[in-house]
Image (cartoon, rainbow, N blue to C red):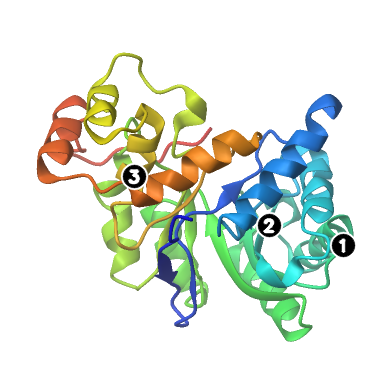
Amino acid sequence: MPVNRRIKLPDGESIPALGQGTWMMAEHPHQRAQEIAALRAGLDLGLTLIDTAEMYADGGAETLVGEAIEGRRDEVFLVSKVYPHNGTRAGVMAACERSLRRLRVERLDLYLLHWREEIPLEESIAGFEALQAAGKIRMWGVSNFDVTDMEDLFAAGGAACATNQVLYNVTRRGPEYDLFPALSSRGIPPMAYSPLEQAALPKGSVLEAIGRKHGADAYQVALAWVLRRPDMIAVPKAGDPRHVAANARALELVLDEEDLAAIDAAFPPPSRKRPLEMI
């Protein structure tokens, strides 16, 4: 079994570097059994961080996760996200209760504001803190926040933010320029969603050549590249047990300096500020 690295959160707790995402799960009933099997296979392989959201399949993904982790809750570091339009103090608390019911659990390990809209961040933080006080969540964080959003969050009293989940992969390297350094300065690890670009990586790329060198495929190379960062958490979605096993093998793949230089040449790092991307 691949050994899953651990990443430290600001409070000192360590969590798996490689987890499982659930975006676009629970959208096709005929795939349900396979998706549940995939999540359970991931748990068996040590991919015990599961990320979901009230947005995914209109809550259906949370319901699916709840079924998948039944009887295994203690193994899981469970993450969900709240819609920004539910970002008031009362809205965050009510949304969390709905998520807990769908997941059939009493507490989330980490609860994220899915992205930022017009509701004052002080309101969202107050909701998170009330949920912590009630024992409904252990930690909270954000998603899709750029540097200025993070500055506003800290100014609003958000020093306890545990992570910022953002779009990051070999084709979308913008956060490296300023966001990742800003997070690192505060000891906040980033969490990469869509680290495999939803299986839409360029065909015939240098990733395939590097994969042949290591006995891996292009997606394992791309995932190992994301995980090369010592502070990075990644949550690829895999709805098939075979794909979960393939993702887990990326933990064993160590890219050398030649590999990293070739990837930089094919997918150049940012040389200037870029707006944070979302999909």
Neighbour tally class for label 3: few under 14, some 14-19, many 20 plus, Cα within 10 Å: many
Quadrant of res 167: top left
Above or below, 261 relative to 71: above
Neighbour tally class for label 1: few under 14, some 14-19, many 20 plus, Cα within 10 Å: some
* Sequence order check, earlier mark of 1 and 2: 2
| Amino acid type at mark 3 | Ala
Return the x and y of residue 98 as percentages of the image width and height. Answer: 87, 58
Return the x and y of residue 222 as percentages of the image width and height. Answer: 35, 36
Q: Secondary structure at mark 3?
A: helix
| Amino acid type at mark 2 | Ser
Q: Is residue 104 left or right of residue 50?
A: right
Residue with the mark numbered 1: 104
| Residue 275 shows in the view | no
* Residue at the spot 22% in from the left edge and 44% down from the top edge: 255
Q: Secondary structure at mark 2?
A: strand
Q: Nearer the viewer, mark 1 or mark 2?
A: 1
Q: Nearer the viewer, residue 40 or 101?
A: 40
* Sequence order check, earlier mark of 3 and 1: 1
| Residue 171 shows in the view | yes
Mark 2 vs 3: CB contact within 8 A: no
* Residue at the spot 59% in from the left edge and 64% down from the top edge: 121
Q: Is residue 13 left or right of residue 229?
A: right
| Amino acid type at mark 1 | Arg
* Sequence order check, earlier mark of 2 and 3: 2
Measured in 3D between alpha carbons, the distance from the residue under mark 2 to the one under mark 3, in whole angstroms, is: 24 Å
Q: Which mark is on residue 51? A: none
Q: Secondary structure at mark 1?
A: loop
Residue with the mark numbered 3: 224
Neighbour tally class for label 2: few under 14, some 14-19, many 20 plus, Cα within 10 Å: many
Q: Is residue 142 left or right of residue 94?
A: left
Residue with the mark numbered 2: 80
